[in-house]
């Protein structure tokens, strides 16, 4: 194996680990905001957009694994802080918008 192949595989594994955190976000969302309904809306918006957009984003970013990794980890950190400090207002439009952004970013 060449050195570049090894680096690419490590970056792809890291991206998959960051994207797998996506499955825990609805649980965190419900825990921090105490709203199962908003957690459901968040998950539905996120999953539906992720399923529709991920092939296109993968095609666009296929030659840029470092930027994919940076975006995925930065988003996870920012959203975790927002939920922890309750900086997100309980509004159905905001929750759906954050779910849509989550779907876009986690489709990396």
Image (spheres, rainbow, N blue to C red):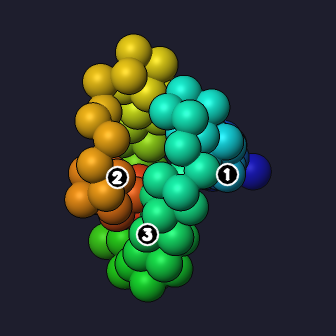
**Comparing labels 1 and 2, the label whose residue is closer to the camera:** 2
Left or right: 87 as drawn, with respect to 31: left
Q: Quadrant of residue 85?
A: top left
Residue 93, how many percent across, how many down? 24, 59
Residue 44, how many percent across, how many down? 52, 70
Q: Of 92 and 76, which appears nearest the observer?
A: 92
Question: For numbered disc 2, what is the local secondary structure?
Answer: helix
Look at the numbered discs 1 and 3 and tell me whether their residues touch, using CB distance below 8 Å.
Answer: no
- The structure residue drawn at horizontal position 38% and vertical position 22%, both measured from the top left corner, is 86
**Compared with residue 79, is residue 92 higher up or lower down, i.e. above or below?**
below
**Compared with residue 52, is residue 29 higher up or lower down, i.e. above or below?**
above
- The structure residue drawn at horizontal position 47% and vertical position 19%, both measured from the top left corner, is 84
Callout 1 environment at 10 Å: few (<14), some (14 to 19), or many (20+)?
few
Q: Is residue 67 visible?
A: no
Residue 45: give its label.
3
- The structure residue drawn at horizontal position 37% and vertical position 71%, both measured from the top left corner, is 57
Residue under label 2, please give it: 95
- In 3D space, how far apart are the residues under numbered discs 3 and 2 (Cα atoms)? 9 Å
Q: Of 65 and 40, which appears nearest the observer?
A: 40
Look at the numbered discs 3 and 2 and tell me whether their residues touch, using CB distance below 8 Å.
Answer: yes
**Compared with residue 61, is residue 12 higher up or lower down, i.e. above or below?**
above
Residue under label 1, please give it: 23
- The structure residue drawn at horizontal position 43% and vertical position 84%, both measured from the top left corner, is 52
Question: For numbered disc 1, what is the local secondary structure?
Answer: helix
Callout 2 environment at 10 Å: few (<14), some (14 to 19), or many (20+)?
many
Residue 89, how many percent across, how many down? 27, 36
Q: Of 79 and 89, which appears nearest the observer?
A: 89
Along the polypeptide, which appears first: circle 3 or circle 2?
Answer: 3
């Amino acid at each position: 194996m060449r050195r570049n192949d090894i680096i690419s595989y490590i970056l792809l594994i890291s991206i998959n680990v960051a994207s797998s955190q996506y499955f825990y976000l609805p649980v965190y969302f419900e825990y921090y905001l105490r709203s199962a309904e908003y957690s459901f809306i968040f998950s539905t918006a996120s999953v539906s957009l992720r399923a529709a957009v991920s092939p296109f984003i993968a095609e666009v970013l296929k030659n840029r694994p470092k930027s994919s990794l940076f975006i995925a980890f930065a988003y996870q950190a920012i959203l975790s802080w927002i939920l922890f400090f309750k900086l997100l207002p309980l509004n159905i439009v905001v929750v759906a918008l954050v779910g849509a952004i989550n779907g876009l970013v986690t489709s990396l």
